[in-house]
Amino acid sequence: MGKPRRPEPPPADPVGGKGSWGPSPGFLAAALGLVVGGVAMAWGWTSAPAADDAQPTAAAAGPAMSVAPMPQAAPASGPAMAPPATAANPSMPASAAAQRIWRSRDPNGDQTPDLADYVNEGERPTMAEVIDRLHLAGVTTGLGAFSPPGTRPPLVGLAVPEDFSVPEGYVRHYQATDDGQRIEAILMFSPDYQFFDAAHRPIAIPPDRVVPPELAPQGLPIRRIVVPAPVDGRRS
Amino acid sequence: MSTGVPAHGGLGSRFFAALRALLPMLALLGFGSDALANTLTQNVSWTIDRAGTTAKYRVVAYGDSIYAGYNGSAFNAAKYAAPTVDAEYLSALWNADIEGVRRAKSGAVASDIYTNKIVAEKSYMQAASTRVVTFEMCGNDGLQARSAFKSQTGTCNYAGMNTAINNCKTYVAAAMDFINANAYAGTKLKVVSNLHYPGYAADNVQSSCKDSTTGATVNLQTLFLPKLATMNYWMCEYARQKGFKCADNFAQYMGADYDRNGDGQVDSDALRYVAGESESSYVTRISTTLRATLRDANAHFVSATTSYDYIQSDDTHPTYTGGTVTAGLFGGTTGSGAPRYTSFAGGKSPIWNQYGHERMGWAVSTSNPAAP
């Protein structure tokens, strides 16, 4: 096992010193020309909005900012970033023009490239699409080793009112959506309990342990929960 | 607000800016840089703004998608990821504003977290307001090794899993040494968070490859559990040796909060790393002795009749509450807000055991010093 690499100390002459190396403008222009086609080919997305594409990208000429592109401080009681239009209409955010792929880096921070360097302006890939594209490119490391959202979707079953006393052998199970919303509790069978019928024969429990209406305890109103819709945009 | 970030770049940043412009072309030319696009930077600085206070202290958290608050989006993340949950506890404990600085990269392996977040972004923990430094890593080393193993056919090759363990040990130790040497001298607490087992239930299947000795397929859960336990042991053991605290998330997530097996111990307590125990003792205890008490964290039992799903729909990342902030392809967030809770009876919020990130943040908070 090799010793972890540490960054080189910063140079004494920061920029443009005599004899320092820098990529030629011509080479950069050629590279940028290839970037547009190259990224599109690499990712295969075809939905780049014209309005966003018409604006210059910040790939190489972005401002040397050290903070996030969003507000420095939010109102004390509210989220800094939640764009209402996105929540109201995820497919066409009104604030899209202000939301640009952030390609700048903290000058004294992590300089390594990441996904942002490979996504065209105007594109809003879901993480499932990102993972799928990585796999198509043969990348199974990093985000490519993640399972996509929805691999194990929320369980849907009978609602359990908070004031309902759960009988022995049953469980009140709480879940949450990926965007942080509480899902109404459902009734499940305990994994540590065996039910028997009137003839003392074991009752088969569904593999997912979700209680079906026909096995609901007495007194439980029969109503299935509804998983809340995402509030923060398209997810699949 | 001090962010510890200089306002201008140098030759290094100019070079890397040019390099970033060239990378897609290099990918097209077949330089194999695809792998460079496999991570997502998700930095968030969120200040718990406590009413009537002026003092402000900082918690710095380095890590991958766990500390990032990854939520299956390329654009946003949980506001109350575990380090921010801890910041809320600190705000009440110290009657102060607490700036939670999360420097995170989803998908990054331990070497990447160490080199490009902890070392390259050391300035964040060098600010004079810093009082807590915490980090987590190794999860992606494990995920990648697991993914590679699952795809194996023919004779099983276990080398990838062992490499992941060795890389984890190397960079966890290096990270602690670096933080010890570079964090602000007034830092009061340093914490490493170890790993839950994502997909524990789903791994209870047989491999496609066959063991060279037995000629039979192997159960993935049986194979991976001791490997993960070894990683977790060394995170906690190095913490003991190097002046860190260990937030034992494996125990917090994987064991019930009651005595499910009747051995006289609450399951989640019995699973905890015991300071000074040997690697073999810990791994045997987790993988064999107490194995029957382990449950997938998608149903964490807080009592015999109540369970909470600690895991998102990707079967990997922790659940959370409290909304989201921009973190990802559109950059990060710097913001502030009032605490959700201003006091904590018994050191626990009302939702401390109801979401994955709340549980992890609480676990980190149990080591918080009484004063800044």
Image (cartoon, rainbow, N blue to C red):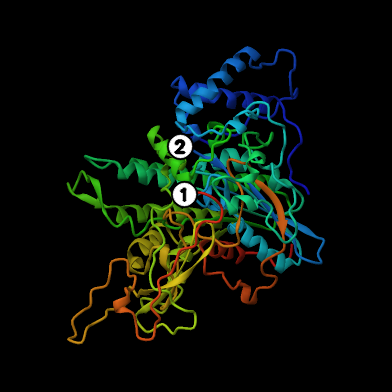
Under tag 1, what secondary structure? Answer: helix
What is the x, y in percent for residue B318?
A: 49, 58
Q: How many marks?
A: 2
In the picture shown, does residue A90 fall above or below B361?
above
Q: Residue at x 72, y 32 (%)?
A: A64
- Give A150 or B243, whichever is nearer the viewer: A150
Q: Residue at x 53, y 32 (%)?
A: A118
Same subunit under labels 2 and 1?
A: no
Name which quarter of the figure residue B23 lies in: top right
Q: Which residue is mark 2?
A: A1
Name which quarter of the figure residue B296 lies in: bottom left
In the picture shown, does residue B40 fall above or below B190?
above
Q: Residue at x 58, y 40 (%)?
A: B329
Mark drawn on residue B200:
none
Amino acid type assigned to the residue bearing label 2 in the image: Met
Tell me if mark 1 has few (under 14), some (14-19) or many (20+) residues whose alpha carbon lies within 10 angstroms of its own.
Answer: many
**Chain identity of mark 1:** B
Q: Which residue is mark 1?
A: B139
What is the x, y in percent for residue A205?
A: 27, 72
Q: CA distance from mark 2 to mark 1?
A: 19 Å
Amino acid type assigned to the residue bearing label 1 in the image: Gly
What is the x, y in percent for residue B173?
A: 54, 47
- Give A44 or B336, whichever is nearer the viewer: A44
**Chain identity of mark 2:** A
